[in-house]
Amino acid sequence: MNNFTDYRFLQVFYPTRGILAYYSRATGRREPLPGADDPHYVQTDGVWSPDGKWVVFARAEAKDPDPPGHTLPTHANDPNEIQIQYSLYKVPFNNGLGGKAEPIVGASNNGMSNNFPKVSPDGRWIVFVKNRNGQLMRPDSELYMVPFDGGEARRMNCNTSRMNSWHSFSPNGRWLVFSSKSRSPYTQMFLTHIDADGQDSPPIYVDNSTASNRAVNIPEFVKAPPGGIQSIDVPASDFYKLLDEAMDLQGKGDLMGAMTEWQQALELEPTDARANNGMGIALGMAGKSAEAVPYFQKAVQAQAEFFEAYYNLAVLYTKQKQADSAIGAWQNVVRIRPKFAQGHESLGSALYVKGDFSNALRELRSAIEEEPNRVVSLRLASNLLATCPDSSLRNGTEAVALADRARQLTNGKDPAVLDTLSAAYAEKGSFAQAIDTEEQAVDLATQEGDVALAGRLKVHLARYESNEPLREGAARASF
């Protein structure tokens, strides 16, 4: 949540809509579970009873996660959060036929949010989280125990001062492991012993389980004999560490070091979109554009909605003057982000160069609609409207309006913009204004020492002095 100011509780997540479904190994299908599939509610956190006869879950009235005019919250338990309080229910599985969901007395309809249930291995108890709103990682999350068939819920003795959640029973049901933030902004593991009567001990901190700046999340017990685990390999953790190191080196300008890290990441996950995109960026920054292209291509093959990779591809194709490939990449950029003005502008420019004037004009108008003061889009669209060989697209009045806006935005100090305005005046038949404006453009180009541009503008000036409008071939030559 980038709008949250308390970094200790940034991972605020809870569903506001959803049903429970089960997967049948026999049919290979997922099916809604009757009794936990009402669309008027959100049903979540489903867990089995040990005998497989019941599913315990959390339920609340369904909410719109982003209602119109909603003010974004700035911290957990901010009144501006979407207010949702879950109640615990149980529903018979009944071989997938489900049944009537029953609220669990003591863990439902109590003005609090009851969530994340776990059933003890002997089926006697449910340990769940209770907090004011939402679920899981809340500052006020506390562990409660209630009989499986409902009754009085007891606040457990093991609760710490801040955030108690992500709990799990040991296989024999005598221990519970859970996470807390009482000692650090990073979650740490605690244990509690549970006797035969369901009474639990004060919390026992599990020391030396991780580095001080790392979190321990969602702990689980593993039923294994002493010495049964020789080592724990975490390739996913190694992969993300390489990503972090590569981006850090890249940010410091150490491109060779970054490429080494990206390569190691790709050896672990050859098709990962982020690693391929990162390698492509590093190669591009090192001036190896041709070598970068295949990595960006792999990134978009792995992730069809990867905006950044498509954008990087489009920029490289444009620089390499591969018009067709550039157009395809820019089309994907605006497909993913339809309101991205720069994408529409770049696609319009590529289509213009390709000679696809109608579609070029459409894209440039889209760019102007999103950002009305984009000088490049205004100039390109005006030039097209003034000089296009397809007379059905020409519109001198609109061309003048767009070019004049670009002139105002550049304070009349851009000779290329003045050249476009001149062409627009000529298309409109206002040759006196075209001549006057083109003379200003020639003077500016001369003052700037751009002899080549001044020469081209003088050719345009001669056309206007002969009462001839400019046409597309000459206009494009000035870009």
Image (tube, grey):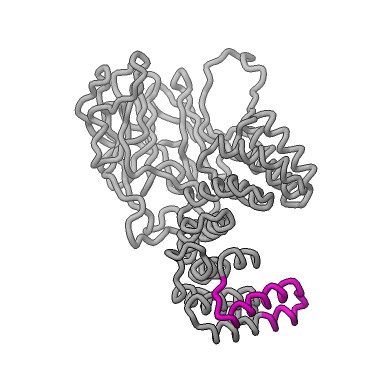
Can you say whether 65 is above or below 27 in the image? below
Specify the principal SS of the magenta part: helix
Residue nearest the observer in this picture, 144 or 332? 332
Q: Is 99 above or below relative to 427?
A: above
**Side of 165 where 412 appears, left or right:** right
Residue 45 % position (x, y):
37, 33
Residue 421 visible (yes or no): no
Membership of 448 in magenta stretch: yes
Residue 476 in which image quadrant: bottom right
Q: Where residue 169 sits in the image (x, y, percent)?
A: 45, 25
Q: Choose top left, top right, bottom left or bottom right for residue 126.
A: top left
Q: Is residue 354 left or right of residue 390?
A: right
Which is more toward the observer, 151 or 274? 274
Residue occupying the point 57% across, 78% down: 422
- In this rendering, position of residue 398 left or right of residue 44: right
Residue visible at 55% across and 41% down in the picture: 187
Which is nearer the eye, 340 or 236?
340
State the residue at coordinates (53%, 58%): 348
Residue depicted at x 62% and y 81%: 438
Q: Residue lying furthest left in this view?
A: 100
- Across and down, in percent, residue 284 comes to 72, 47
Disc count in the image?
A: 0
Give the magenta range: 442-470
Q: Is residue 430 visible?
A: yes
Q: Quadrant of the C terminus?
A: bottom right
Say above or below: 44 vs 131.
above
